[in-house]
Image: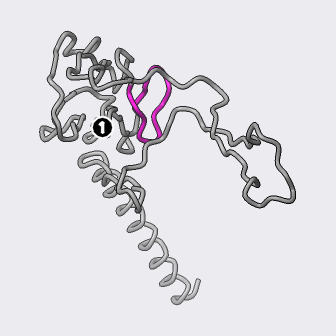
Amino acid sequence: MSELTLLLLRFGFLFILWVFVFAVVYALRTDLFGQRARRLPADVATGQPFVASAVAPSVTFSTPAPAWNPGSASDATEAFSVQSDRAQPPRAQSSTAIATRLVITSGPKEGLELTLPTEPLTIGRSSESGLVIRDDYTSTHHARLMHWSEDWVIQDLDSTNGTFLNGTRVTLPTPVPLNTPVRIGTTSFELRR
């Protein structure tokens, strides 16, 4: 082998070695500190935060009860409605049905009750979290529980093992109905009045 080929092989192996070193450092950083929380998209006009429903809506068009007269432009209206293919999960109907407590129903802290704060409640292994859950299946910054309008909403913060609402993995901020189990790691909790 020529000296030039040997030199290029050495630089190639050195480059591959550094790629592996940076990959390991990135993986360790993510495990120790978690990934950065992303901002929620907000409706620009109203300033209201985006909340995903558990069921994707389907769009249907229906005509109003009076018949449309082709000669009259004022009667040329169509009603537009968004309907769901399946039933929506139960939701709090009035301000009297808003959750005020978080009750841990299973896990190491079973029976613990917390009064829900007005600001977002972070959940995870970090000592900076509002609800600290220390187990092998919980990320450092695992999830966030927020109060929007009349609902409490759970948001998964890109955790490794996921957040589950009534057995379904949460991928977008989702409203949490009263007395519905939320599982994070080995801990389950419910929101109650």
Report the coloring of the rendering: one colour
Identify residue for label 1. Answer: 139
Name the one closer to the observer, 40 or 34. 40
- Looking at the rendered structure, the number of numbered marks drawn on it comes to 1
Q: Which x, y percent locates residue 60? A: 72, 41
Residue 177 sits in quarter: top left
Say which quarter of the image contains residue 120: top left
Q: Answer with the quarter of the image where residue 189 lies.
A: top left
Q: Residue 168 lies in magenta, yes or no?
A: yes
In the image, residue 104 sits, relative to residue 3, either above or below, namely: above
Q: Secondary structure at mark 1?
A: loop
Q: Outermost residue, front direction?
A: 72
Type of amino acid under label 1: Ser
* Place of residue 79 in the rendered image (x, y in percent of width and height, measured from the top left): 68, 45
> Is residue 23 left or right of 117 when viewed as pictured?
right
Q: Residue placed at 16% from the left, 16% from the top? A: 113
Was residue 175 drawn as part of the magenta stretch in this picture? yes
**Quarter of the picture holding the N terminus:** bottom right
Dividing the image into 4 quarters, which one contains the C terminus?
Answer: top left
Q: Residue 181 at x, y = what percent?
A: 38, 18
Residue depicted at 45% across the width and 79% down the height: 11
- 155 left or right of 103? right
Residue in view at x 51 percent, y 88 percent: 3
Q: At 43% across and 73% down in the image, what residue appears?
A: 15
42 to the left or right of 114: right
Q: Observer-nearest residue: 92 or 109?
A: 92
What are the residue bounds of the magenta stretch? 163-176
Decide: is 116 above or below 160. Answer: above
